[in-house]
Amino acid sequence: MYRSKFFAPTLVLALLSFSMPITAEDDQAVELIGFAGMRGGWVEGQPGWIEGGFGRLAAGGEAPGDSDGWIRGETQLALRFNPSVSWQAKVHAVARASSASNEGDTAGLTEAWARYRRAVGHRGELALTGGLFFFPSSQENIDPLWASPYTLTYSAINSWFAEEFRPLGLDAEWQSFTEDGDIWSLGATVFGGNDTLGTLVTWRGWAMHDRLSGFNEVLPLPPVFSLDDGGSFQAQRRFGTTGFGSDLDDRPGWAARARYDRGNAFSGQVAWIDNRGNRMLHGNEWAWDTRFLHAGGHWQVTEAAELMAEITSGNTRIRFPGVPWVDADFRAAYLLASIDTRTGRWSLRHDRFHVDDLLENADWGLFNDRGRTLTFAWIRDIGARSRLAVELLLLESERTVAEQSGFPPDTDGLTLLAEWRTRF
C-alpha cells in the first residue's frame, strides 16, 4: 500500500546514507545559505487570508477601504550538501513573526530532498530527486530558496504553489544537450501528500503573497457559511486545511513536463499535474481531485531586460457519495517585465485569475472568483549581502461567497511595502 508519509522521508534518508560518506576536498561540501529580513508597510482591504478573512493579501484592515500598518520579520535557512559531483541534498526551513493575527505556524520545514545525477552518453544527463521539493515550474521564483529576485509578492499562481503544492515523492529528469548549446528536458514525478490541493483556490479563492507553507501546516480558511456548524461542509476541519503533508487516500499523484532552453536567451516549459485525489472525506479533510495544465516561458530580451509569463488552467472537485459537492474550473496567468539598471531592478507584473463554479448551488456556496492585479517593484542590492526593496500592489477582485457569508463581496486590496534583507 502506498503511503507517502513513510515513503518520502525514508527515500531521503536512503539517498543521504549513500551520499554523506563521500567527502569533498573543498569547503563547499556543506553550505549554509539563507537570509533574514524585515518587511513593513501599509495594507488596505478586508482581513488577510492568513488572518482567516476573505482578503487576498497577507494582512488587511477590518473592511473594504480600511487600512492598517503591517510588519513581518522572517528568516529562512537551508543546508546544502554537495559531497560529490553526482550527489546533492538540501534541507530548507522558515521562521517568521508578524503583526497580523497570523493563524499559521511560526516555523516550518519547506524542503528536504536528495538528488543524484549521472551522465548518459556524450550529450545526456539523468537526475533523480527524492523527498519534499518545489515543482520545477516557476519562471519568477528562481533564487536558491525559491524566492523571487523581481518582486516581494509572488504571482497568484506561485502564491498558490507556495501554499499547497509541494510534491512529496520521486522526480526523474532527462536532459539532452545539442551541439549548439540548447537543452531539451523531459521530466516525470510521482508524489503523495498533496491530496488537499484545490482547497484554498476554491473555498478561499486566489491570493497574493510570498508565504511558504511548512510540512503538515494547518492554514486558515475564510468564514464561508457552508463550512460552519450545520453547513454542507461542516465536516471539514473547522476553517482549516493542511496545505501538504501526510497522505490521505493512499493514491499517488503524478506530473509530467517538457522543457526547452536556448542558451540563456529563451526557455519554455509545459507540464501536466494530477494529484489523483479520490474526492472523499478522510476524517476532517477532503482529498480533492485536482488536475491542471501549466505552461511558462522566459525571454532574455537584452542583457538587462527580461520578459516572463506563466499560465495554469484546470479543474478541482470533491463529492458526497453519488454527486459532486464542489466542481470548479480555475485559471490564472501573469506577464512580468523586468529591467536591471544601475539604480536597481525595476519590475512590473500583471496577473489575472478566475474560478468558475460549475454547480452554482447557492445552498453550498457560489465559489466564482474574479480578479486582477498590477504589481510594481524596485529591488536594489546594497553591498555584497543585503538588498532594499519597495513594492506597490493594486488588486481588484470580488468574491460571491463572501457576500453569502455576511461579508462584503469587494475583496480589493492595496499594499505599499518596503523590505530590508540580509543574505548569509
Image (tube, rainbow, N blue to C red):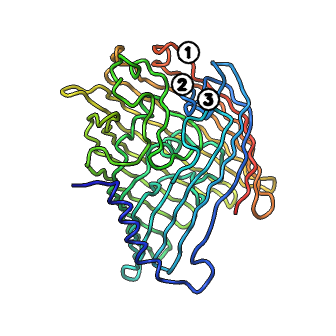
Location of residue 233 with respect to 276 vertically, above or below: above
Nearer the observer, 83 or 418: 83
Tag 2 or tag 3, which sits nearer the N-term?
2
CA distance separating discs 3 and 2: 13 Å
Give the x, y percent position of residue 397. 55, 24
Q: Name the residue under label 1.
A: 408
Give the x, y percent position of residue 361. 33, 17
| Quadrant in which the C terminus appears | bottom right
Q: Which residue does the image show at 35% across and 62% down from the upper left?
A: 170
Considering the numbered disc 3 on the image, is that residue within a helix, a strand or a loop?
Answer: strand
CA distance separating discs 2 and 1: 9 Å
Which image quadrant for residue 363?
Answer: top left
Q: Would you say 140 lies left or right of 358 here?
A: right
**Number of residues whose C-alpha sits closer than 10 Å to that of mark 2, classed few (under 14), some (14–19) or many (20 or more):** many
Q: Name the residue under label 2.
A: 54
Nearer the observer, 37 or 383: 37
Q: Which residue does the image show at 43% across and 23% down from the upper left?
A: 368
Q: Would you say 165 lies left or right of 51 here?
A: left
Which image quadrant for residue 191?
Answer: bottom left
Location of residue 146 with respect to 51 vertically, above or below: below
Give the x, y percent position of residue 167. 40, 53
Check whether the beta carbons of the residues at disc 3 and disc 1 lie within 8 A of each other: no
**Number of residues whose C-alpha sits closer than 10 Å to that of mark 3, classed few (under 14), some (14–19) or many (20 or more):** many
Residue type marked 3: Leu
CA distance separating discs 3 and 1: 15 Å
Tag of residue 395: 3
